């Protein structure tokens, strides 16, 4: 879900502020967010098998999270549709904002429908209490911080790689133009 939030901010940067690097940030974030969502679904299934006795159930939280993963795949597919840079940026930004609608649905699914999952132990809107204590709270905090830092690092690496690809593409164009000019001089 963190990925969709970052992509939505980048989408606003593309649509509202027309920042040239906003689309690059969204492009860098999408595959990492998709990988983390897939990892969430797979590890959840591994945990669910001994707990519920099944690998998958059409639980609202699982289903909306699976939909979130499919939306990531759709967004990644839309990124490869040809068009000018400006048109692609707008199209991708609109797709990211439309897909972001599923993020609150995922969070509130345990409140809205009967679910195998418990309501959140942190940020519970019904009880307004945190029910995680002791070493479990520290473990959860450590895991949250670790995965957030890993997400940020991976996105930063993909962002840097996108810059290198753009530079290589520009450099390759300059070489092709120079070769063409040499051919014309003969």
Image (spheres, rainbow, N blue to C red):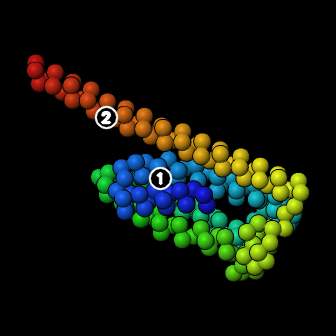
Residue carrying label 2 = 170
Tell me which residue sits at (40%, 48%) in the image: 21
Q: Which is more N-terminal, label 2 or label 1?
A: 1
User: At which x and y percent is residue 50?
Assistant: 87, 60
Looking at the rendered structure, which numbered label has been put on residue 181?
none
Q: Is residue 92 visible?
A: no
User: At which x and y percent is residue 9?
Assistant: 48, 59
Tell me how many marks there are: 2
User: At which x and y percent is residue 154?
Assistant: 59, 42
Q: Is residue 47 left or right of residue 2?
A: right
In which quadrant is the N terminus drawn?
bottom right
User: At which x and y percent is residue 90?
Assistant: 36, 60
Tell me which residue sits at (76%, 59%) in the image: 44
Q: Is residue 159 visible?
A: yes
> Camera-side residue: 72 or 112?
112
Q: Relative to 35, is 122 above or below? A: below
In which quadrant is the C terminus drawn?
top left
Q: Residue furthest left?
A: 185
Q: Is residue 113 left or right of residue 80?
A: right
**What SS does tag 1 mark?**
helix
Distance from Cα at disc 1 to Cα at disc 2: 21 Å
> Camera-side residue: 87 or 121?
121
Q: Relative to 128, is 169 above or below? A: above
> Camera-side residue: 126 or 159?
126
Q: Is residue 186 left or right of residue 92?
A: left
Tell me which residue sits at (49%, 61%) in the image: 8
User: Could you say which quadrant of the image residue 3 lies in?
Assistant: bottom right
Tell me which residue sits at (87%, 61%) in the image: 133
Q: Is residue 51 left or right of residue 64?
A: right
Residue carrying label 1 = 26
**What SS does tag 2 mark?**
helix
User: Could you say which quadrant of the image residue 184 lies in?
Assistant: top left
């Amino acid at each position: 879900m963190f990925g969709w939030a970052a992509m939505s901010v980048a989408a606003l940067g593309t649509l509202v502020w027309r920042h040239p690097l906003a689309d690059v940030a969204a492009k860098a974030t999408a595959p990492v967010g998709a990988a983390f969502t897939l990892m969430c679904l797979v590890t959840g299934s591994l945990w669910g098998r001994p707990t519920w006795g099944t690998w998958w159930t059409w639980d609202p939280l699982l289903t909306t999270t699976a939909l979130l993963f499919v939306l990531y795949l759709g967004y990644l597919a839309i990124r490869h549709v040809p068009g000018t840079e400006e048109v692609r940026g707008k199209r991708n930004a609109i797709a990211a904002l439309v897909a972001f609608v599923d993020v609150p649905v995922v969070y509130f699914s345990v409140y809205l429908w009967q679910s195998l999952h418990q309501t959140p132990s942190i940020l519970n809107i019904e009880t307004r209490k945190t029910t995680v204590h002791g070493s479990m709270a520290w473990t959860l905090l450590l895991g949250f911080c670790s995965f957030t830092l890993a997400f940020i690092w991976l996105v930063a690496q993909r962002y840097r790689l996108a810059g290198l690809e753009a530079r290589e593409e520009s450099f390759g164009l300059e070489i092709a133009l120079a070769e063409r000019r040499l051919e014309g001089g003969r």
